[in-house]
Image: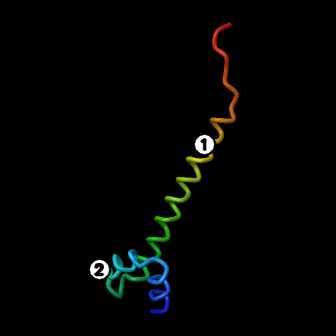
Amino acid sequence: MAYDYAESKKDPLSHDIREMFFPEAGDRLMGIWLKLVKSKVLMGCIQCVNSARESSHRPHQKRGN
């Protein structure tokens, strides 16, 4: 329960969602799932920023001759 209590202090909404859908037995699984989702979202944001930086630093190609 120490893990659950610590998580509830950091993110009360996800704690409430966990309690609603995964009482007791699924608590640890839901915590792991939330961490995975948060990391995937963060990695997606980082990739978007990196691709935007790359496209802004590329020299524009001249068309024509």
Q: Quadrant of residue 25?
A: bottom left
Nearest the eye: 57 or 44:
57
Nearest the eye: 18 or 25:
18
Q: Residue at x 45, y 86 (%)?
A: 4
Farthest residue to the left: give it. Answer: 20
Please identify the quadrant where the N terminus is shown. bottom left
Residue denoted by label 1? 51
Question: Mark 2: which secondary structure?
Answer: helix
- Specify which label sits upstream in the sequence, 1 or 2: 2
Farthest residue to the bottom: give it. Answer: 1
Residue 56 position (above or below residue 21) = above
In the drawing, does residue 29 fall left or right of residue 65? left
- Residue 63, disc: none
Q: Quadrant of residue 15?
A: bottom left
In the drawing, does residue 2 fall left or right of residue 65? left
Q: Residue at x 56, y 57 (%)?
A: 43
Residue 35 percent location from the top left of the image: 49, 71
Asked whether the beta carbons under mark 1 and mark 2 sit within 8 Å of each other, the answer is no
Q: Residues within 10 Å of mark 1 (few under 14, many from 20)?
A: few
Q: How many marks?
A: 2
Question: Mark 1: which secondary structure?
Answer: helix
Q: Residues within 10 Å of mark 2 (few under 14, many from 20)?
A: few
Residue denoted by label 2? 20
Query: Could you give the CA–CA distance between mark 1 and mark 2, rounded to whole angstroms?
Result: 38 Å
Residue 54 percent location from the top left of the image: 65, 39
Please, what is the three-letter code of the amino acid marked with disc 2? Met
Residue 3 position (above or below residue 56) = below
Residue 46 percent location from the top left of the image: 59, 53
Please, what is the three-letter code of the amino acid marked with disc 1? Ser
Please identify the quadrant where the C terminus is shown. top right
Residue 28 percent location from the top left of the image: 43, 82
Q: Residue at x 62, y 46 (%)?
A: 50
